[in-house]
Image (spheres, rainbow, N blue to C red):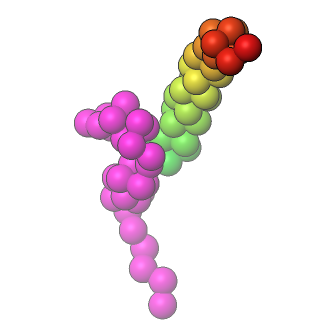
Amino acid sequence: MLAKIPEKEFIMIAQQCLELELRKKFEGTKFNDIYELGIKASRYENLLKEEIERKVLIMEPIIKKHWI
């Protein structure tokens, strides 16, 4: 038997299951629906990935210089 969970409770559960960086970003944020949570979390996750990629590109020449 499946239990019906109100969407607001489902959103709260979904927020608790996010990775730490996303949980920190959206702590205390109220979402209207699960779609909004998904879109905002996905956008923020992409920004985090872009930030990491930029750091790697900046550090790459420095690391190569020290190893050569």
Q: Position of residue 54 (x, y in %)?
A: 63, 15
Identify the residue at image location x=68%, y=18%.
67
Whether residue 28 sits left or right of residue 46 in the image: it is left
Identify the residue at image location x=33%, y=35%.
24
- Looking at this rendering, what residue extends furthest in the bottom direction? 1
Nearer-the-camera pick, 35 or 21: 21
- Residue 45, quarter of the rendered image: top right
Nearer-the-camera pick, 29 or 8: 29
Residue 7 visible in image: yes
Q: Is 7 a magenta residue?
A: yes
Q: Position of residue 12 (x, y in %)?
A: 34, 52
Q: Point out the stretch of residues depicted in magenta.
A: 1-30
For residue 61, above or below residue 10:
above
Nearer-the-camera pick, 40 or 23: 23
- Residue 48, quarter of the rendered image: top right
Quadrant holding the C terminus: top right
Q: Position of residue 51 (x, y in %)?
A: 57, 19
